[in-house]
Image (cartoon, rainbow, N blue to C red):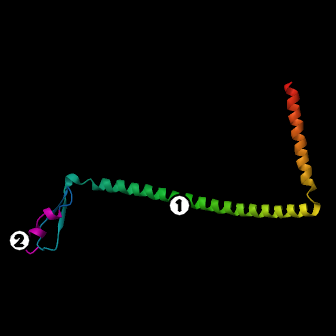
Amino acid sequence: MASNTGGSFHGGAAPYRSREGLSTRPVASSDEIQLRIDPMHADFDDEITGLRSQVRKLRHVAEEIGTEARFQQDFLNQLQLTVIKAQAGVKNNLRRLNKSIIQNGGNHIVHVVVFALICFFVVYFWSKMSRK
């Protein structure tokens, strides 16, 4: 930087040229830069308006996503409570069933199995007779 003489670093436009339509002008103080916007490329207002509308749309989508996430979280919480209640009910019923089996004996289960076997054989013989 010591070889820069004549203020070409701060005064020249080339080091500060960022894109088409923007250029710098040398000013009296070497610490200041003035920007000039070329009127041919002044459609930045339209771009800004377009970007603002896109930001609004994205904000609306983000709000909808947040609403949906809250709804689904509430639904999952309710579902979890329902499952917990159902588990408690099943556990209670199993406890009652075990108590009734112990008190009354296991004869009713034997009756159910015998009934199922009789039904099976009746259907089996009926299907054999209907084929002939």
Mark 2 and mark 1 residues within 8 Å of each other at the beta carbon = no
Going by the numbered disc 1, the residue's amino acid type is Gly
Percent across and percent down for residue 127 are: 85, 31
Q: How many marks?
A: 2
Callout 2: SS: loop
Q: Is residue 23 left or right of residue 89?
A: left
Percent across and percent down for residue 23 are: 17, 61
The answer to which image quadrant residue 87 occupies is bottom right
- Quarter of the picture holding the C terminus: top right
The answer to which image quadrant residue 22 occupies is bottom left
Going by the numbered disc 2, the residue's amino acid type is Gly
Give the class, few, some or many, for how many residues have Cα within 10 Å of label 1's Cα (few <14, many ≥20): few
Residue that label 2 marks: 6
* Residue 12 belongs to the span the image colors magenta: yes
Please tell me which residue lies in front, 53 or 106.
Answer: 106
Q: Is residue 86 left or right of residue 41?
A: right
Q: Residue at x 91, y 45 (%)?
A: 115
Q: Residue at x 77, y 64 (%)?
A: 88
Which is nearer the N-term, disc 2 or disc 1? Answer: 2
Please tell me which residue lies in front, 84 or 5.
Answer: 84
Q: Residue at x 90, y 37 (%)?
A: 122
* Residue 85 belongs to the span the image colors magenta: no
Magenta residue span: 1-16
Percent across and percent down for residue 52 are: 38, 57
Q: Is residue 103 left or right of residue 3?
A: right
Percent across and percent down for residue 130 are: 87, 27
Give the class, few, some or many, for how many residues have Cα within 10 Å of label 2's Cα (few <14, many ≥20): few
Residue that label 1 marks: 66
Looking at the image, which residue sits at the far top? Answer: 132
Q: Is residue 45 left or right of residue 26?
A: right
